[in-house]
Amino acid sequence: MRAAPTLCALARAKKAVMRQNKAIGRSVPGSRESAYKRGYNSKSWDSKKKRVFARDHGMCRKCSRICVHGANDNRIRPHTDHIVPKPLGTDDIDNLQLLCGECHGRKTRKEMIENAR
Protein backbone atom coordinates (compact mmCIF):
# COMPACT_ATOMS: atom_id res chain seq x y z
CA MET A 1 0.00 0.00 0.00
CA ARG A 2 1.31 3.41 -0.94
CA ALA A 3 1.68 6.20 1.58
CA ALA A 4 -0.70 9.12 1.55
CA PRO A 5 0.50 12.13 -0.43
CA THR A 6 2.58 14.55 1.59
CA LEU A 7 1.54 18.14 2.15
CA CYS A 8 4.46 19.22 -0.05
CA ALA A 9 3.17 17.07 -2.91
CA LEU A 10 -0.34 18.50 -2.52
CA ALA A 11 1.05 22.05 -2.41
CA ARG A 12 3.03 21.39 -5.63
CA ALA A 13 -0.14 20.02 -7.23
CA LYS A 14 -2.12 23.11 -6.25
CA LYS A 15 0.59 25.39 -7.65
CA ALA A 16 0.55 23.43 -10.91
CA VAL A 17 -3.22 23.89 -11.20
CA MET A 18 -2.80 27.60 -10.51
CA ARG A 19 -0.14 27.83 -13.29
CA GLN A 20 -2.47 26.00 -15.70
CA ASN A 21 -5.35 28.34 -14.86
CA LYS A 22 -3.13 31.38 -15.38
CA ALA A 23 -1.95 29.99 -18.72
CA ILE A 24 -5.51 29.63 -20.02
CA GLY A 25 -6.54 33.05 -18.76
CA ARG A 26 -8.68 32.37 -15.71
CA SER A 27 -8.80 35.56 -13.68
CA VAL A 28 -8.60 34.02 -10.21
CA PRO A 29 -5.76 31.51 -9.87
CA GLY A 30 -7.01 28.15 -8.64
CA SER A 31 -10.63 28.92 -9.49
CA ARG A 32 -12.92 26.82 -11.64
CA GLU A 33 -16.08 27.68 -13.45
CA SER A 34 -19.26 27.00 -11.52
CA ALA A 35 -20.87 23.55 -11.59
CA TYR A 36 -23.65 25.10 -13.68
CA LYS A 37 -21.21 26.39 -16.32
CA ARG A 38 -19.41 23.04 -16.36
CA GLY A 39 -22.75 21.33 -17.13
CA TYR A 40 -23.34 19.54 -13.83
CA ASN A 41 -26.76 21.07 -13.09
CA SER A 42 -28.52 19.86 -16.22
CA LYS A 43 -31.22 17.26 -16.75
CA SER A 44 -28.82 15.43 -19.05
CA TRP A 45 -26.16 15.15 -16.28
CA ASP A 46 -28.78 14.04 -13.73
CA SER A 47 -29.93 11.34 -16.13
CA LYS A 48 -26.35 10.12 -16.64
CA LYS A 49 -25.73 10.03 -12.87
CA LYS A 50 -28.85 7.89 -12.38
CA ARG A 51 -27.82 5.53 -15.20
CA VAL A 52 -24.30 5.16 -13.77
CA PHE A 53 -25.70 4.51 -10.27
CA ALA A 54 -28.02 1.81 -11.65
CA ARG A 55 -25.35 0.26 -13.90
CA ASP A 56 -22.87 0.03 -11.01
CA HIS A 57 -25.58 -1.26 -8.63
CA GLY A 58 -24.95 1.59 -6.18
CA MET A 59 -21.47 0.23 -5.40
CA CYS A 60 -18.14 2.05 -5.55
CA ARG A 61 -16.09 0.65 -8.42
CA LYS A 62 -12.86 0.91 -6.41
CA CYS A 63 -13.73 -0.49 -2.96
CA SER A 64 -17.23 -2.02 -3.52
CA ARG A 65 -18.70 0.10 -0.71
CA ILE A 66 -22.47 0.62 -0.98
CA CYS A 67 -23.16 4.29 -1.73
CA VAL A 68 -26.15 6.03 -0.14
CA HIS A 69 -27.85 9.14 -1.58
CA GLY A 70 -28.23 11.90 1.01
CA ALA A 71 -25.87 10.28 3.52
CA ASN A 72 -24.43 12.60 6.15
CA ASP A 73 -21.09 10.81 5.82
CA ASN A 74 -19.39 11.99 2.61
CA ARG A 75 -17.35 8.78 2.52
CA ILE A 76 -20.44 6.79 1.46
CA ARG A 77 -22.13 9.40 -0.77
CA PRO A 78 -22.15 8.45 -4.45
CA HIS A 79 -19.89 10.48 -6.74
CA THR A 80 -20.10 10.16 -10.51
CA ASP A 81 -16.49 10.28 -11.67
CA HIS A 82 -14.88 10.67 -15.08
CA ILE A 83 -12.55 7.69 -15.65
CA VAL A 84 -10.51 9.77 -18.09
CA PRO A 85 -10.56 13.32 -16.66
CA LYS A 86 -13.13 15.57 -18.31
CA PRO A 87 -10.60 17.89 -20.02
CA LEU A 88 -9.12 14.84 -21.79
CA GLY A 89 -12.23 12.66 -22.06
CA THR A 90 -15.98 12.95 -22.52
CA ASP A 91 -19.22 12.89 -20.54
CA ASP A 92 -20.15 9.64 -22.32
CA ILE A 93 -21.54 7.05 -19.89
CA ASP A 94 -18.69 4.67 -20.79
CA ASN A 95 -16.27 7.25 -19.35
CA LEU A 96 -18.19 7.53 -16.05
CA GLN A 97 -18.00 5.39 -12.93
CA LEU A 98 -19.57 5.41 -9.49
CA LEU A 99 -17.14 6.06 -6.63
CA CYS A 100 -17.74 6.62 -2.94
CA GLY A 101 -16.65 10.00 -1.59
CA GLU A 102 -13.51 8.57 -0.04
CA CYS A 103 -12.28 6.88 -3.24
CA HIS A 104 -13.25 9.90 -5.35
CA GLY A 105 -11.20 12.21 -3.11
CA ARG A 106 -8.23 9.83 -3.23
CA LYS A 107 -8.41 9.58 -7.05
CA THR A 108 -8.69 13.37 -7.44
CA ARG A 109 -5.66 13.99 -5.18
CA LYS A 110 -3.65 11.41 -7.12
CA GLU A 111 -4.56 13.05 -10.44
CA MET A 112 -3.58 16.48 -9.08
CA ILE A 113 -0.19 15.17 -7.97
CA GLU A 114 0.43 13.43 -11.30
CA ASN A 115 -0.51 16.60 -13.21
CA ALA A 116 1.91 18.62 -11.09
CA ARG A 117 4.87 16.59 -12.30
Image (cartoon, helix red, strand yellow):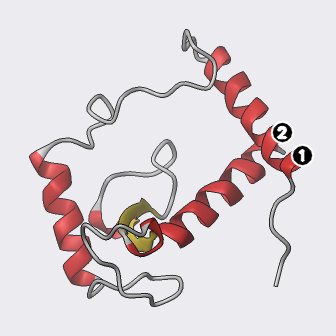
Mark 1 highlights which residue? Answer: 8
Q: Residue at x 54, y 70 (%)?
A: 102
Give neighbour class at mark 2: few <14, some 14-19, many 20+ (Cα, 10 Å): some
**Is 101 situated above or below 63?**
above
Q: Which residue is drawn at 10% across and 48% down?
A: 43
Q: Nearer the viewer, mark 1 or mark 2?
A: 1
Q: What element carries label 1?
A: helix
Quadrant of residue 57 within the rendered picture? bottom left
Q: Which residue is drawn at 48% across and 28% down?
A: 32
Q: x and y percent of residue 82 in the render?
A: 44, 59
Left or right of 36 in this view: 4: right
Query: Where the C terminus falls, by quadrant?
Result: top right
* Labelled disc at residue 78: none
User: Which residue occupies the extreme front position in the image?
Assistant: 72
Tell me if label 1 and label 2 are in contact, CB under 8 Å. yes
Mark 2 highlights which residue? Answer: 12
Give neighbour class at mark 1: few <14, some 14-19, many 20+ (Cα, 10 Å): few
Left or right of 32 in this view: 49: left
Q: x and y percent of residue 51 in the render?
A: 18, 71
**Is 7 situated above or below 58?**
above
Q: x and y percent of residue 93 in the render?
A: 28, 65
Q: Which amino acid does label 2 sit on?
A: Arg
Query: Where the N terminus falls, by quadrant?
Result: bottom right
Left or right of 114 in this view: 78: left
Q: x and y percent of residue 12 in the render?
A: 84, 39
Q: Is mark 2 on a helix, strand or loop?
A: helix
Between the C-alphas of marks 1 and 2, the distance is 6 Å
Quadrant of residue 27 within the rendered picture? top right
Quadrant of residue 66 within the rendered picture? bottom left
Nearest to the observer: residue 14 or residue 22: 14
Q: Residue at x 16, y 55 (%)?
A: 46
Q: What residue type is labelled 1?
A: Cys
